[in-house]
Amino acid sequence: MRNAGFGTRLRPLTFSKPKPLVEFANSPMILHQIAALAKVGVKDIILAVNYQPDVMVEAMAKVEEEFNVKIHFSIEPEPLGTAGPLALARNILLKDDEVFFVLNSDVICEFPFEGLLAFHKSHGCEGTLMTTRVEDPSKFGVILCKPGSTQIQKFVEKPTEWVGDQINAGIYIFTTDILSRIQNRPMSIEKDVFPLMAKAGQLHSIPLQGFWADVGQPKDFLKGTGLYLNSLAESESTVLRLAPQSANIVGNVLIHETAVIGENCKIGPDVTIGPG
């Protein structure tokens, strides 16, 4: 899990803590990902960290016991980009030669890891990345596959004319073969590694179903909260606790079980209230 950024885009929330520990829907952002990984049987989790590593180590101590996982820390002496941390963690990743997931810490979605794993095994190539559809692809790098295939043909960065609307969702699964492509230095997995994998016919894509949000900026954090609560309401409506009948709840609202809501309060839409 890539958590090495300084969280500058999410300030002021990251002035006092690393971005992965910022509360999202009453839980640190990183715990949403760890819970989803543990649910599909992942036992070893590597966190690539650079900013406030001591804070991350302390915060994760209880998480290991809660989710029955072993958390390893890959502490970067300098920012290594989006690929370099994989080389830094090479010894851990090669321990059992299993496939492994890679996640951007900013991403919030329903994390369909079981489906991603099954699809990856079905094509037998080096890597799979999840894609998501966006309304304005001109702001992103668009992924193009071979006609009638899931094999990625090329990437088009911020296209000025329509070529497609599927972009990188920041969720991947790889075999350990990818490590031969990555050096222990600053590298970009998107610019330095993926194009070479695509050229070699070793990279496939699968579209993500359901909502997706990159919550690395305040406006996207708020939008992502709304998408998450809407998904929660559709799948686990009992989790959205109602306040007293006298309170005016507008839309989806997530209220911590210890929070005390007074009479005649108006709350919502798309609001989360933490512990009381």
Image (tube, rainbow, N blue to C red):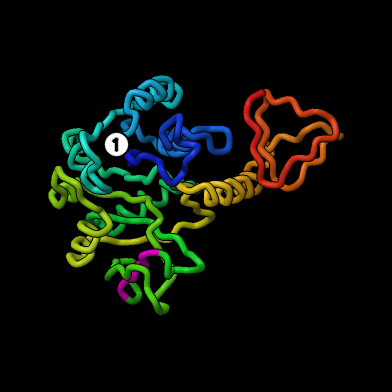
Residue beneath disc 1: 48
* 22 vs 143, nearest the viewer: 22
Q: Residue furthest bottom?
A: 161
255 sits to left or right of 155: right
175 sits to left or right of 241: left
Quarter the N terminus occupies: top left
* Residue type, numbered disc 1: Ala
For residue 239, say whether it is visible: no
Position in image of residue 93 (x %, y %): 21, 37
Position in image of residue 30 (x %, y %): 44, 36
Is 63 included in the stretch rendered in magenta?
no
Residue interval drawn in magenta: 140-146
- Above or below residue 134? Residue 184 is above
Q: Identify the element where label 1 is drawn.
A: strand
Residue at the location (41% across, 73% down)? Answer: 164
Residue at the location (31% across, 56% down)? Answer: 128
- Above or below residue 175? Residue 164 is below
Residue at the location (41% across, 23% down)? Answer: 59
Quarter the C terminus occupies: top right
For residue 63, say whether it is visible: yes
Position in image of residue 215 (x %, y %): 48, 47
Secondary structure that dominates the magenta span:
strand
Position in image of residue 166 (x %, y %): 42, 66
* 171 vs 76, nearest the viewer: 76
